[in-house]
Image (tube, helix red, strand yellow):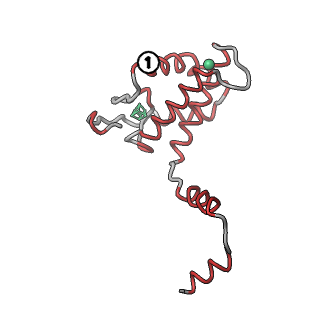
């Protein structure tokens, strides 16, 4: 066994497999800060919308929970990743039709209120919107 092998065995003797798996998943996380921020902005907007329209308090209603999960999944699969413009300006718009309607409703209501509730996120969003949206062949979408 090489020196590294001996060293790691003495430093991390018999760690349970699940711990090693979690550690590897954490270190392999490649989510870009831009995507993380987009998800945070989405969460904030859906929260504002759900509280006002569905009269919820600490948790989202099932409909908004479903929508948020879908929107986050689209971000994970976004072909532009950290180079993306805002979804509102996107030329591809990868959302399925009913979700596209839902996102419009959420944005229309929460967009103007973001400056008041989350000024930092709102300014970042406006800044991200300066990026020119790119075209992409539909076959490149999943
Ligand atoms: S709408 Fe456009 S920018 Fe937003 S996730 Fe889909 S492909 Fe990416
Ligand atoms: Zn709701």
Residue at (64%, 25%) from the top-left corner? 47
Above or below residue 21? Residue 113 is above
Residue at (49%, 21%) from the top-left corner? 103
Q: Position of residue 22 (x, y in %)?
A: 61, 57
Q: Nearer the viewer, residue 127 or 111?
A: 111
Quarter that holds the N terminus = bottom right
| Ligand 2 - quadrant of the structure image | top right
> Mark 1 = which residue?
98
Residue at (41%, 39%) from the top-left corner? 78
Q: Position of residue 83 (x, y in %)?
A: 41, 43
Please state if 63 lies on the left or on the right of 100 as rendered: right
Q: Is mark 1 within 8 Å of ligand 1?
A: no
Q: Nearer the viewer, residue 42 or 14?
A: 14
Quarter that holds the C terminus = top left
Above or below residue 22? Residue 61 is above
User: Which type of secondary structure does the marked residue at label 1 adopt?
Assistant: helix
Q: Quadrant of residue 133?
A: top left
Q: Position of residue 88 (x, y in %)?
A: 44, 26
Q: Position of residue 102 (x, y in %)?
A: 49, 18
Please state if 31 lies on the left or on the right of 141 as rendered: right
Please state if 112 lies on the left or on the right of 13 as rendered: left
Q: Nearer the viewer, residue 77 or 35?
A: 77
**Count of numbered circles on the image:** 1
Residue at (30%, 39%) from the top-left corner? 140
Please state if 14 lies on the left or on the right of 30 as rendered: right
Above or below residue 14? Residue 90 is above
Q: Quadrant of residue 69?
A: top right
């Amino acid at each position: 066994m090489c020196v590294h092998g001996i060293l790691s065995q003495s430093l991390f003797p018999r760690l349970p497999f699940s711990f090693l798996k979690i550690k590897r998943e954490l270190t392999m996380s490649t989510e870009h800060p831009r995507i993380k921020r987009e998800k945070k902005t989405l969460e904030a907007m859906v929260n504002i919308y759900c509280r006002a329209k569905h009269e919820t308090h600490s948790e989202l209603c099932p409909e908004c929970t479903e929508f948020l999960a879908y929107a986050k999944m689209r971000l994970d699969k976004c072909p532009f990743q950290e180079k993306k413009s805002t979804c509102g300006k996107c030329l591809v718009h990868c959302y399925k039709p009913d979700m596209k309607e839902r996102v419009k409703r959420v944005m229309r209501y929460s967009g103007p209120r973001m400056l008041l509730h989350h000024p930092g996120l709102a300014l970042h969003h406006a800044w991200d919107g300066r990026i020119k949206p790119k075209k992409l062949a539909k076959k490149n979408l999943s």
